[in-house]
Image (tube, grey):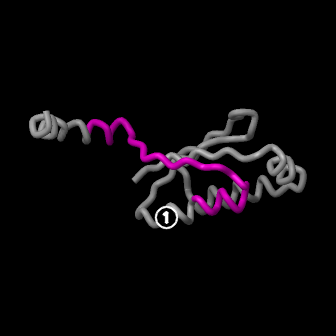
Amino acid sequence: MRVMVKFRFPVDEGNEVIRTGRIAQIFQQLTEDLKPEAAYFYPDGGERAGHFIVNMQDGAEVAGIAERFFFGLHAEIEMTPVMTAEDLQKALSGIKKTIERYA
């Protein structure tokens, strides 16, 4: 299942990992471990932020993904299941039965 991991980390912690050069190492480790199909970075609410699109095989992976961001960046995170356009088309093909049953 594809999951969007949104993260945001405090300025002070961000300044420290940038100052020490650890930021490159942390994002390299995150990329190697999570193998995101996409990664974006931007400012959000005055803090450093971004999101990764990752594939989870099992719900038990939630803790492992979250802890990487907590320990590495002291980040707040949100995890949201997401679909590609192809996934959406597949999902919509079964909607008619649901509508008939619940409408």
Q: Amino acid at mark 1?
A: Glu
Q: Residue 11 location in percent, x, y? A: 80, 43
x 68%, y 34%: residue: 44
x 16%, y 40%: residue: 98
Q: Residue 18 location in percent, x, y? A: 84, 49
Q: Residue 2 location in percent, x, y? A: 43, 50
Q: Nearer the viewer, residue 62 or 26?
A: 62
Residue 68 shown left or right of residue 56 in the figure: right
Residue 58 shown left or right of residue 6 in the figure: left
Residue 57, compared with residue 14, is above or below; it is below
Q: Toward which corner of the image does residue 28 lie, by quadrant? A: bottom right
x 75%, y 34%: residue: 46
Magenta span covers which residues? 66-89
90 part of magenta stretch? no
Identify residue for label 1: 61
x 85%, y 55%: residue: 21
Other residues around mark 1 within 10 Å, as few (<14) / some (14–19) / many (≥20): few
Q: Nearer the viewer, residue 48 or 102?
A: 102
Quadrant for the C terminus, please. top left
Helix, strand or loop at disc 1? helix
Residue extending furthest toward the left: 100
Q: Residue 75 location in percent, x, y? A: 68, 51
Residue 82, compared with residue 68, is above or below; it is above
